[in-house]
């Protein structure tokens, strides 16, 4: 005779549930054990030496007074209307750029900028509206303060068949902060 189907289904379901439950318990215990072992903590180890807490530093008898600032005493100079001396020495030096190209299509400018980036040269795209010609996207390298840097970068670009034009810009002292 055949066994009833209801008994085997009941046993299989309970044995799977029991196996999953035992697996979860064993996994949790192992995870806690590994965590304690990895951190070096042992909850079963008793330390026989007793550590005494350090006493807290004694509070001062009188609290420190907050410093008081007077606005006009903090500023340099004696008179409130006196201005600090202006620094105009670095504003007179010209800035040099190397223009590697000017394109009407922004994708072409991005391609050239990517080529320069592969060479290790950082470039900037400047967009400007030229009268009767439309919008041009300039690919420029710089700014440089010394001609040695300009010549070094220009020779690198020439070796890689990228023509570059020198652009000199004298900053306006009113624009420089």
Image: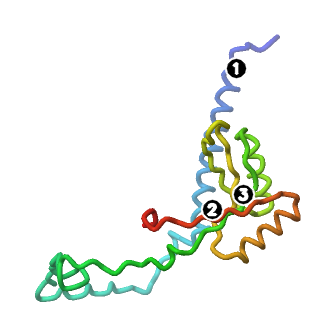
Q: Is residue 156 above or below residue 110?
A: below
Mark 3, other Cα within 10 Å: few <14 / some 14–19 / many ≥20: many
Identify the colour scheme used: rainbow
The answer to whether residue 50 is left or right of residue 6 is left
Q: Distance from label 3 to label 2 (Cα)?
A: 62 Å
Q: Distance from label 2 to label 1 (Cα)?
A: 37 Å
Where's residue 167, x and y in %? Answer: 68, 62
* Figure quadrant of the C terminus: bottom left
Where's residue 31, x and y in %? Answer: 61, 56
Q: Quadrant of residue 88?
A: bottom left
Q: Name the residue nearer the viewer: 111 or 79.
A: 79
Q: How many marks?
A: 3
Residue that badge 3 annotates: 99
Residue that badge 1 annotates: 9
Q: Does label 1 or label 3 sit earlier along the sequence?
A: 1
> What label does residue 34 carry, if any?
2
Q: Name the residue nearer the viewer: 64 or 16.
A: 64
Where's residue 23, x and y in %? Answer: 65, 44
Q: Are marks 1 and 3 in contact (CB under 8 Å)?
A: no
Q: Is residue 172 above or below residue 61?
A: above
**Of all residues shown, which one is farthest toward the top?**
1
> What label does residue 176 carry, if any?
none
Q: Secondary structure at mark 1?
A: helix
Q: Does label 2 or label 1 sit earlier along the sequence?
A: 1
- The residue at the point 27 percent across, 87 percent down is 55
- The residue at the point 85 percent across, 63 percent down is 158
Q: Secondary structure at mark 3?
A: strand
Q: Quadrant of residue 144?
A: bottom right
Q: Is residue 83 above or below residue 14?
A: below
């Amino acid at each position: 005779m055949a066994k009833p189907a209801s008994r085997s289904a009941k046993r299989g379901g309970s044995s799977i549930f029991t196996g999953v439950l035992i697996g979860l318990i064993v996994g949790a215990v192992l995870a806690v054990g590994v965590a304690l072992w990895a951190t070096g903590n042992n909850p079963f180890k008793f330390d026989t030496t007793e550590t005494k807490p350090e006493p807290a530093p004694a509070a001062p008898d009188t609290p420190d007074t907050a410093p008081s600032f007077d606005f006009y005493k903090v500023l340099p100079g004696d008179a409130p209307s006196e201005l600090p001396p202006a620094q105009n020495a670095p504003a007179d030096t010209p800035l040099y750029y190397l223009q590697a190209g000017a394109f009407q299509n922004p994708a072409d400018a991005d391609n050239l900028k990517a080529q320069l980036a592969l060479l290790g040269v950082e470039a900037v795209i400047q967009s400007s509206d030229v009268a009767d010609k439309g919008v041009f996207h300039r690919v420029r390298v710089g700014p440089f303060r010394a001609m040695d840097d300009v010549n070094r970068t220009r020779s690198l670009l020439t070796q890689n068949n990228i023509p570059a034009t020198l652009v000199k810009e004298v900053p306006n002292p009113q624009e420089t902060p």
